[in-house]
Structures are given as structure tokens and as C-alpha cells.
Amino acid sequence: MGERKIGLVATICIAVVVLLGVSTALLIFDTRTTGADALRTGGLAAGSVVALYALWLNDRRRRTEELRQETERERYELENQRADLDRDRIADERFARAVELLGHETDQVRVGALHALAGLARNRPDYTQTVLDVLCSYLRRPFAHERYGAVFETQEEKDEAERWLQVRLTAQRLVVELLPRVDDTGAPAYDLDLTGATLEYFELTDRKVGTLTLRYGKLFSDNNFSRSEFHGPVWFTAATIGPGRLYGRFRCDDVVFHQLAWFPGTTFHGRANFRRTRFSGTTKFDQSHFGNALSMTDAEFHTEADFRGARFDADVDLSGTTFRGEVLNVGITTSPDHDVVLPAGWAPTPSTSERSGA
């Protein structure tokens, strides 16, 4: 404030000097100028000095305001960064705590930990893939249940297996809920690593998935993948689908495999449906075993399709199936007691019962 007062006083003094100087100069050097004209001209000159000072003062005020705004912006950004770091720290702590509780001895605590992880993924999308990895890791843990052929000696063991089964079914459901729907075009396609996992009633209908790995997996009861899209490779190598007391179906209708679909050595105990499914990449069903009916009506194979050594023990319907790439079908075995509809040119090998009857 002191500098501003000094500047104002100095400006007034300079303006007065300019007023007197210009007026006096005009009266001395221009005899035609009257006193009123000289005073008016001097006033204009003095006013110009005051105007220049006002402009300078306004520019200084503007620069001061810009500096203040820049300081406020930097402070706001710093506070945002601090808040982000706090959120990250809290999220990391929640994640670590939930993962730790997945090993708790009671099923209720584990279910709560699973829901805590899912909630974290919903609030922080950058955690979604990590949470899915953890849930899949939990499902990859060895598990036994009476429905899966295990034998328990005591009722206590049966009850414990049932409790852990409910935890696993919760993990399965949360995995599906965290996956985006097919019609959500802007959502990322997350990967699922379920190598060797034991699953039951696994539903991926209408979901978008990246890479799916189910090598050596065991899928019990009915499992439904219909209308889903897989944007990465799909691996079902040596998987077992539908074993147990009641053979379950494997529904894979209207599915799109954008990359390779690998089913070599896979055993389908229940009915398998691949109706209207599109296989865009290399597809392998070599050495696969279909213990129940198979329907691939109106399916599309856009590149190589490998069925070498596939075994069909029940009805087979490949009517309307389109093959646009190389087809490998040497060593196919079918049953003489069931309806078999294969594409033209396929020559299945007679089953053992058929050869003995001949």
C-alpha cells in the first residue's frame, strides 16, 4: 500500500509539472496560443500521464491476479494429488486386508472379503483386473464335494464342504458380475485364468471376456456361455465338462470367438451345444470326447478347424455348419446307435461295437 501511495503522489507531481511545462512552452513558443488553449493542452498532457499510470497500475493488478490464480491452481492440484494418494493408500489397504481375510477359517468372513474385493473393483475400475485375478486364484484352489465324487466319513466333513462350496459359488457370481456385458462396447475385455479350477453352474452369458484359460478345469452341472464374446484366446485343453452324478449341459450357443478356440482333449459328459457359434480363429477339437449329444448347427468356422481323433458317443448334428478354412477330420469315431449328421466328405471311423457287429 505504501508503494501505491508513493506512485500516486509521484504521478500527480509529474502531471502537474507536465501541465505547467506544456502550458508555459505553448505560451512562449506559440504566440497565437491563448492562455485557455495552452491550459487545455497542458491538461490533456497531464491527463495522459495519469492515464499511463492507471494502465500500468491495472496491468500490475492483472499480473498479480494471474499469479494468485496460478498459485491457487497449483495448490488445488497438490491437494488433488494428495487426495489421490490417500485414496490409493486406502484402496491398497482395503485390498490387502480383503486378500488376507480370504484365508480366514470361517466361511462368513471369506464371503465378506469377496464382497469387499468386488466393491473395491466397482469403485476403482483400475483394480478390476487385479480383483478378478484374485477371485480366479481362489477358484483354482483344490476343492472336494460329494457332488463332485468325493467321499466323506463324517457329517461334519460334509457340512464343512457345503460351507466352502457356498463361498466358491459367491466367488463365481462376483467374477461374472465384474465382467462387462457384450453390448458395452467401450468397456475393456478382462482376462480370466481358471486353470485347473473346479466350477459349477458357471454362467458367462452375454459377457465380454478377454483371454479365458480353463486348461484341466472341471465344470460340474450345467454351464452356460451363450451369447458371450471372447476377444482373446480361449483355452479348454484337457478340461472335463459335466462329470458327476447328473451329467450337465455345456451351452455355448451364439458365441463369438474372435481368436483361437482350443478344446483338444476336452471331455464333454453332458450335452454340448455350439449352435450358431462363430469361430473366427483357429479351432481345435482334436482328441475331444463327446459322451452325450453334440449340436453345432449353423456354426461358422472361418479358419482351420481340427477334429482329428474326436470321439462322438451319442447324437451328432453339424447340419448347416460352414467351414471357410482347412478342415482336419481324420480318425473321427461315431456311434452306430445314434443319429449322426456330419458335413459332406467326412468319413468317420466305425466304433468298436460297429466293427464287432460287422
Image (spheres, helix red, strand yellow):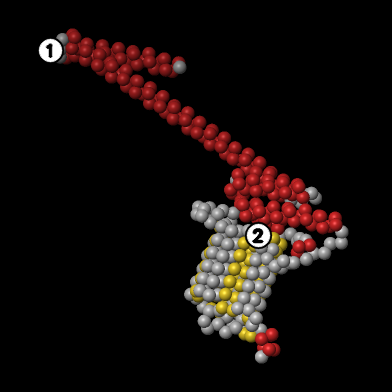
> Label 1's element?
loop
In this view, which residue lies farthest toward the top?
35
| Residue 95 in sight here | no
Callout 2–callout 1 Cβ contact below 8 Å = no
**Residue farthest toward the left in the current orientation of the protein:** 32
Q: Quadrant of the N terminus?
A: top left
Taking the view exactly as shown, the residue that stands out farthest to the right is 154
The C terminus: image quadrant: bottom right
Residue 150 in which image quadrant: bottom right
Q: Secondary structure at mark 2?
A: loop
Q: Residue at coordinates 68% horizontally, 66% vertically from top-left?
A: 248
Image location (x, y in percent) of residue 339: 60, 78
**Tag 2: residue type?**
Phe
Q: Position of residue 9 (x, y in %)?
A: 37, 13
Residue 352 is marked as none
Q: Which mark is first along the chain, 1 or 2?
A: 1
Residue drawn at x 65%, y 62% is 223
Q: Nearer the viewer, mark 2 or mark 1?
A: 2
x 66%, y 77%: residue: 313
* Dot 2 crowding, Cα within 10 Å, few <14, some 14–19, many 20+: many
Residue type at tag 1:
Arg
Compared to residue 342, the image places residue 33 above or below, namely: above
Residue marked by disc 1: 32
- Indicate whether 188 appears above or below 119: below
Nearest the viewer among 106 and 19 is 106
Residue 99 vertical placement versus 215 (above, below): above
Instruction: Quote the CA–CA distance across marks 2 and 1.
Output: 107 Å
Q: Which mark is residue 202?
A: 2
Residue 269 appears in the rendering: yes
Quarter of the rendering containing residue 202: bottom right
